[in-house]
Image (cartoon, rainbow, N blue to C red):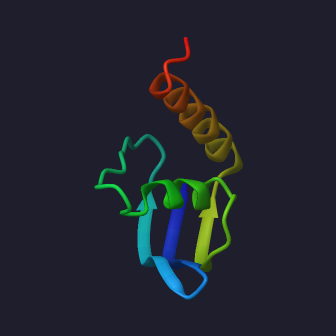
Amino acid sequence: MLTLKNVTNRLWDKPILKNINWETELGQSWAILGPNGAGKSTLGKLILGELPYCGEFSVMKKFRILLKLHMFLLSSKRFGCP
């Protein structure tokens, strides 16, 4: 469903994500946790296709659409929207 192999994202010359390897299977649940500045949002944007990257990356189209909806709902709750 989602595969990342040696994925790196840079902001100018600074690596934000470096050599990320991750594979998920259909039916798995997972969460991305970490302190501020750890790259959680960057990874989410990369998965959604909003950021450039180096490495190998594949994701099912249906999964990407569901993830966008889920991230939107989480953002709405965070900012106090009904």
Name the spot of residue 79 as percent of width and height, x first.
50, 26
Which quarter of the rendered picture does the N terminus lie within?
A: bottom right
Q: Is residue 60 left or right of residue 82?
A: right
Q: Relative to 43, does residue 65 appear above or below in the rendering?
A: above
Instruction: Name, please, the residue furthest toward the bottom.
Output: 13
Residue 67 sits in quarter: top right
What's the residue at 59%, 32% (across, down)? 72
Of residue 62 and residue 14, the one placed in the foreground of this image is 14
Which quarter of the rendered picture does the C terminus lie within?
A: top right
Name the spot of residue 36 as percent of width and height, x first.
34, 55
Residue 31 sits in quarter: top left
Name the spot of residue 34 as percent of width and height, x first.
29, 55
Of residue 81 and residue 25, the one placed in the foreground of this image is 81
Name the spot of residue 7 as percent of width and height, x first.
52, 77
What's the residue at 51%, 70% (across, down)? 4
Instruction: Name, please, the residue furthest toward the top.
Output: 82
Q: Relative to 8, does residue 45 appear above or below in the rendering?
A: above
What's the residue at 69%, 59% (across, down)? 49
Q: Relative to 20, does residue 64 appear above or below in the rendering?
A: above
How many numbered discs? 0
